[in-house]
Amino acid sequence: MDWIINFDKELLLTLNGIHTPFFDYFMFTISGKEVWLLLYLTIIAVIGNKYGWKQGGAIVLAMILTIVLSDQITSGIMKPFFERFRPSRDPDLSNLVHIVNNYRGGKYGFASSHAANTFALAVFSILFFKHKPLAVFMLFWAVMVSYSRIYLGVHYTGDILVGAIIGATVGAVIYGVYRKYIEPKFNEQVTEKCTMLTTNSIVVIGVTIFLTLLLAAKTMI
């Protein structure tokens, strides 16, 4: 077990040691929750537009449950149980870690709730929409947000991998429960409406946010 922990620390220092002012801004920003609010609202709007607000509400609640459950497993159970210091809080490592804007996160970091939450939403969305461009974007989004936590020095790679596995599992399980027990209760036929608000809208909004942040980061140099 010791060699795994040591390898995790060495890998963290290697990845965290690759940094520039450009990515300091970019990674710090995408790690935040507020910047993705428009993406979340777009997902809700697309679901409501396609399924109506009755069935759409049930779908959104399933998504919220997915995120809440993955967050509680990682932050509510695992972090206080394992009590593994974040790299930014580890007395033996904190002086070697690159910190951005003096952000160090909470005391413990195993497992990553950022990774769990993003992968939970990504997997649920991929299984639900079955839309290839959206699947590619959601996976890219989850990976980038998760990697930003390593870049910022607040999570080890192991924290991220375990969090991602937990989130993906929760997303798949909740989707399965929705399909088996919730979806059959709605007998209304889904009607496609003549509107520009489609699944592609989620991809467009998400990519636009990424490009905007990249341009903003470029101006910071």
Image: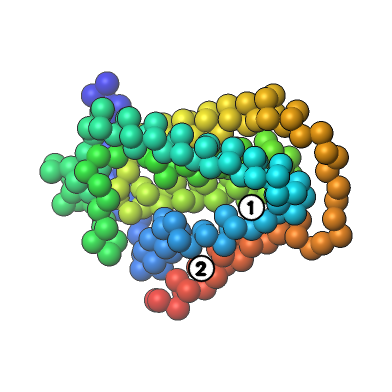
Q: Mark 1 points at which residue?
A: 44
Q: Closer to the camera: disc 1 or disc 2?
A: 1
Asked if residue 40 lies left or right of residue 18, the reply is: right
Q: Which residue is drawn at 85% across and 55% down?
A: 193
Q: Which residue is drawn at 39% across and 76% down?
A: 221
Tell me the amino acid under the disc marked 2. Leu
Q: Residue at x 71, y 42 (%)?
A: 55
Which quadrant of the figure has residue 81? Answer: top left
**Can residue 218 be seen?**
yes
Would you place residue 1 above or below residue 77 in this image?
above
The image quadrant where one finds the N terminus is top left
Q: Label 2: few (<14), some or many (≥20) within 10 Å?
A: some
Q: Label 1: few (<14), some or many (≥20) within 10 Å?
A: some
Would you place residue 112 above or below residue 207 in this image?
above
SS type, badge 2: helix
SS type, badge 1: helix
Tell me the amino acid under the disc marked 1. Ile
**Can residue 6 be seen?**
no
Question: Which is nearer the eye, 104 or 188?
Answer: 188
